[in-house]
Image (cartoon, rainbow, N blue to C red):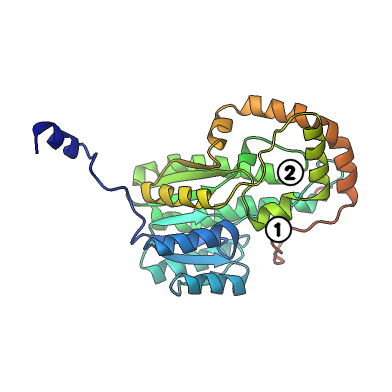
Amino acid sequence: MNASAARVQRRGFFRPAPQVAGKRILITGAARGIGAALARQLHASGARVALLGIEAELLAEVAAECGDAPWRYCDIGDPDQVQRVVDSLTRELGGLDAVVANAGIAKQFSMLGGDPQVLEEHLAVNVLGVYYTLRAAGPHIAHPNGYALIVTSLAAAVHLPLAGAYSASKAAVEALGQTLRIELRHTGARVGLAYFAELDTDMTSRGFDTVAARSILARGRDAGMATISGIAPLGPAIDGMERALARRSRRTVSPYWVGAVLWCRPLAQRVIDYALRAGVEPGLDIARTERVSFTTDQPSRPRRMRRLA
């Protein structure tokens, strides 16, 4: 080996890419969609996964496909339950290297005239649930190899009509993740945020593919403004999450163009505002009578927020 090659090797250019093999990873919302696909791929890559969610039968099936991985029913809106389950699963894994805060819900919501409970439920699951997960898992990952990957959304940066509850919750999740990154830095642990647009999952089809939303988007296209890219395949997002877990990355996006949108949030929002304005009023009229459900049926839990008057 010549001197130049030796210098390159010392600098790490010949080192193999980081792998997830052997990592102990806890995934929330693992019964379907992103969580289930990620669990299967991580298991295939040699990671040891633990799963939690509220759809027990589906969760058991995913766990069986992941080498009989440990799993638990867990309502992430219940802080005591989250603490017990995370501690129990961590003991079964013999420690924790990473947590993926993925669980979340979505439902269309009009700011004026919408049911306040829809917003409250988004906050209970998408915000408090993520917080409870990170609060419980934080001490277990607070070490130099520790990592938290938090699933937020492009909706945290660019806001669409009828998605106010979901967008608000994901913006809050983004803030929690960025704060946790600073607060964990001294331990050596890292925090990453996953920003996704519409992916081919049940959340997209059940949460966002409504008659009212289609009406608004169609009028935007009729006006010659193609602001929405359509549903993207799930695979690249899962590949990106695996790379993020291996490298303890600060950010992962899917599709690729989401990264560019994040850099120009104000401009992107102005384009959305202009493109969709013609469809908002008729879309709101449809939303007032359209019956839609949450993307995942939620268990009853004590109300932790004051009902709006």
Label 1 CA crowd tier, 10 Å (few <14, some 14–19, many 20+): some
Q: Is residue 271 left or right of residue 60?
A: right
Report x, y in % for residue 304.
Answer: 69, 56
Q: Give the quadrant of the N terminus.
A: top left
112 versus 66 height, above or below: above
Q: Is residue 147 visible?
A: yes
Residue depicted at x 45% and y 42%:
181
Residue type at mark 2? Ala
Residue 308, image x, y percentages: 80, 48
Identify which residue is drawn at 38% across, 57% down: 97
Q: Residue at x 73, y 49 (%)?
A: 208
**The disc label shown at residue 146, or none:** none
Residue reaching furthest left?
A: 2
Q: Is residue 308 left or right of residue 237?
A: right
Local packing at callout 2 (Cα closer than 10 Å; few below 14, some 14-19, many 20+) is many
The answer, for residue 121, to whether it is visible in the render is no
Q: Name the residue rendered at 76%, 26% in the picture.
A: 274
Residue 34: x and y, percent? 56, 56
Pointer 2: what residue?
A: 163
User: Going by the image, does 252 lie left or right of 145?
Assistant: right
Pick whichever, 236 or 156, lies toward us: 236
Query: For the residue marked with disc 1, what is the amino acid?
Result: Thr
Question: Is residue 305 depicted above or below 298 in this figure?
Answer: above
Disc on the earlier residue, 1 or 2: 2
Above-or-below relation of 99 to 2: below
Q: Which residue is mark 1?
A: 295
- Secondary element type, mark 1: loop
**Quadrant of the image occupied by residue 4:** top left
The secondary element bearing badge 2 is classed as loop
